[in-house]
Image (cartoon, grey):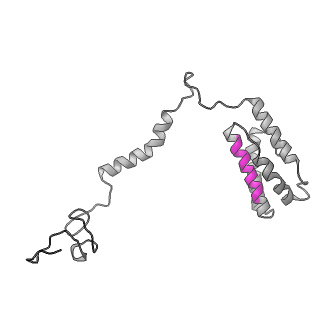
Amino acid sequence: MRTREGRSTGLLRGRRHGGRPGDLRRGGGAGPGRKTTGQPSLGGWLAIVLLLAAPLLASACGSSASSGAHASHTPRPSAAAIAATCQKVADALADGPDPSVDPVGYAEAQVLPLHQITTSDSSLHVAIDHLAAAYQTLFRDDGTKAANAVVTAAAKQVEKFCPGRTS
């Protein structure tokens, strides 16, 4: 924008002034005679540090293993509860076609029963869900070697909680 005398007011920064057409900024930003380093400002660095430190600070506020007064909010399930869940896994895997005769049909038969198993142990629950997803992949991919490898890996995770129950 120009005054009557033809001088620029600096309100509208066009291409000749280093800005974009229609840019309504006055001053600030990169332009003729301004140097930028490409590095975040002090406030930018502070934000980055806080963002990276937030998970550490949050975990420090949680309970510690050595503090008896501050026990975990979600108690670990008892050994009997885990054993009962493992029995459900074994029962689910025992149903269906013979895996040596019809591995794809067997995989299909395992998906729903495994997804229906519930447990209060979140790690075991994740392992069972991964096994169900692996069987779904085996079924979807029609029994490929890669899908079989996924099932084997998922079964090993369940085996950590339920030894001998997935074979």
Q: How many marks?
A: 0
For the record, the magenta segment spans 124-137
Residue 83 on image: x %, y %: 79, 34
Residue 151 on image: x %, y %: 76, 53
- Magenta stretch secondary structure, dominant: helix
The quadrant in which residue 63 appears is top right
Residue 118 against residue 38 in the figure, above or below: above
Residue 35 against residue 5 in the figure, above or below: above
Residue 97 against residue 22 in the figure, above or below: above
Q: Is residue 20 left or right of residue 51?
A: left
Name which residue lies at 35% across and 50% down: 45
Q: Is residue 124 left or right of residue 36?
A: right
Residue 163 covered by magenta stretch? no
The answer to whether any part of residue 167 appears in the image is: no
The answer to whether any part of residue 78 appears in the image is: yes
Name which residue lies at 48% across and 42% down: 55
Asked whether 146 or 4 is in front, the reply is 4
Name which residue lies at 80% across and 48% down: 113
Residue 128 covered by magenta stretch? yes
Name which residue lies at 88% across and 48% down: 95
Q: Is residue 25 left or right of residue 161?
A: left
Residue 130 on image: x %, y %: 71, 50
Residue 29 on image: x %, y %: 26, 63
* Outermost left residue: 5
* Outermost front residue: 4
Q: Is residue 5 left or right of residue 141?
A: left
Asked whether 10 or 4 is in front, the reply is 4
Asked whether 36 or 87 is in front, the reply is 87
Asked whether 113 or 138 is in front, the reply is 113
Residue 63 against residue 13 in the figure, above or below: above
* Outermost top residue: 69
Q: Quadrant of the N terminus?
A: bottom left
